[in-house]
């Protein structure tokens, strides 16, 4: 059965691993690893076995030329593009906002405004990024993306676990504090975003935040099977929803990314144990590996040990819950 391939919630493949991904397409398969059990599997990337490729990124600029090749090969594609315009010390290795917008527009023209969604995600409220900052930044980006997308996905930063520790360290180092708005404050700000977006023909959706749903803001399906069906199958295909966390509305997919491999260095990201590890893994990356994050030799050893075929991947034994991470996917 053909699959939706997620490329990728776990890391930014278009920004950092485009050469690896294109080699995987040429080879016709890729390895993927269950992040919660470590089990490894192979999945076919042959055009006939791929229902659609769902891309996630904060910087598609390095991937624009490969993407033209992907399109020529006949793959069905949808895109999520995260553009927040947060200060550089929050997103220290990202391209400038205008550069990201320009490459967003290129993809929209290459496919269509329906194929690509804008993620203003996560909303980080701090001493230097209060409501005025966000409203001004949001309106600027929305005005530039008018006519180039129909959808904007919102979510607020979730500050627990490693993210909370990263925020505390950042505050200790810089003196910049973070603020977790009340639910009513979040609703008010999100409604203001929606009012702005509608001026530019963009509908706002809430990602994993059903308390924001109202007549202005709809529930997000960031990896949307119905959208894929409408774009490519005249509405005659029906996907199965597989929530990746509470209140997620995404359609089931196979994610070929790997945690601890994204060197963007965003302070709100919880796909990396730490920035240094991700930078080290990225620097050692082998574009000819079967599994992202491993060497070619390691990957070939894993693949030879698998008693599964590429065409008929073995079912996952451990439930593969793929976090739809704010700002990453979370790409």
Image (cartoon, rainbow, N blue to C red):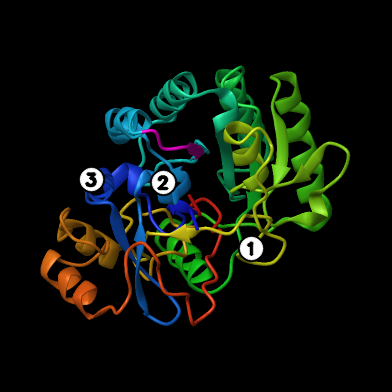
Q: Which residue is mark 1?
A: 242
Q: Image check: 74 left or right of 328?
A: left
- Is residue 82 in view from this perspective? no
| Residue 330 image position (x, y, % from top left) | 50, 54
Magenta stretch encompasses residue 75: yes
Residue 107's place in the image compared with 215, above or below, is above
The numbered dot on residue 48 is 2
Q: Nearer the viewer, mark 3 or mark 2?
A: 2
Helix, strand or loop under label 1: loop
**3D distance between C-alphas at marks 3 and 2:** 13 Å
| Residue 122 image position (x, y, % from top left) | 58, 49
Q: Image check: 250 left or right of 84?
A: right
Residue 282 picture quarter: bottom left
Helix, strand or loop under label 2: helix
**3D distance between C-alphas at marks 1 and 2:** 23 Å
Magenta stretch encompasses residue 14: no
In terms of sequence position, does the residue under pointer 3 or pointer 1 come before the other? 3
In terms of sequence position, does the residue under pointer 3 or pointer 2 come before the other? 3
Q: Image check: 40 left or right of 98?
A: left
Q: Give me the residue at 37% from left, 80% from top.
A: 38
């Amino acid at each position: 059965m053909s699959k939706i391939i997620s490329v990728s919630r776990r890391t930014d493949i278009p920004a950092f691993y485009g050469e690896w991904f294109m080699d995987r397409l040429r080879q016709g398969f890729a390895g993927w690893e269950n992040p919660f059990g470590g089990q490894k599997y192979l999945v076919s990337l042959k055009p006939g076995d791929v229902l659609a490729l769902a891309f996630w990124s904060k910087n598609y600029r390095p991937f624009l030329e490969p993407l033209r090749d992907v399109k020529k090969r006949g793959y069905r594609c949808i895109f999520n593009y995260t553009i927040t315009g947060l200060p550089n010390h929050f997103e220290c290795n990202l391209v400038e906002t205008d550069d990201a917008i320009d490459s967003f527009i290129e993809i929209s023209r290459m496919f269509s405004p329906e194929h690509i969604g804008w993620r203003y995600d996560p909303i980080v409220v701090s001493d230097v990024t209060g409501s005025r900052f966000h409203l001004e930044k949001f309106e600027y980006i929305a005005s530039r993306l008018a006519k180039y997308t129909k959808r904007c996905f919102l979510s607020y930063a979730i500050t627990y676990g490693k993210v909370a520790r990263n925020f505390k360290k950042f505050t200790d180092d810089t003196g910049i504090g973070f603020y977790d708005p009340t639910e009513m404050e979040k609703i008010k700000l999100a409604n203001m975003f929606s009012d702005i977006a509608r001026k530019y023909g963009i509908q706002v959706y809430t990602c994993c935040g059903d308390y924001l749903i109202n007549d202005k803001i709809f529930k997000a399906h960031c990896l949307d099977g119905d959208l894929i069906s409408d774009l490519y199958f005249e509405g005659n295909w029906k996907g199965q929803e597989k929530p990746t966390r509470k209140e997620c509305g995404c359609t089931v997919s196979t994610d070929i990314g790997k945690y601890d491999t994204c060197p963007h260095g965003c302070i709100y990201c919880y796909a990396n144990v730490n920035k240094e590890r991700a930078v080290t893994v990225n620097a050692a990356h082998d574009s000819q590996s079967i599994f992202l994050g491993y060497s070619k030799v390691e990957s070939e050893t894993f693949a030879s040990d698998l008693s599964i075929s590429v065409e008929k991947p073995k079912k996952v034994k451990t439930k593969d819950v793929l976090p739809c991470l704010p700002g990453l996917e979370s790409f």
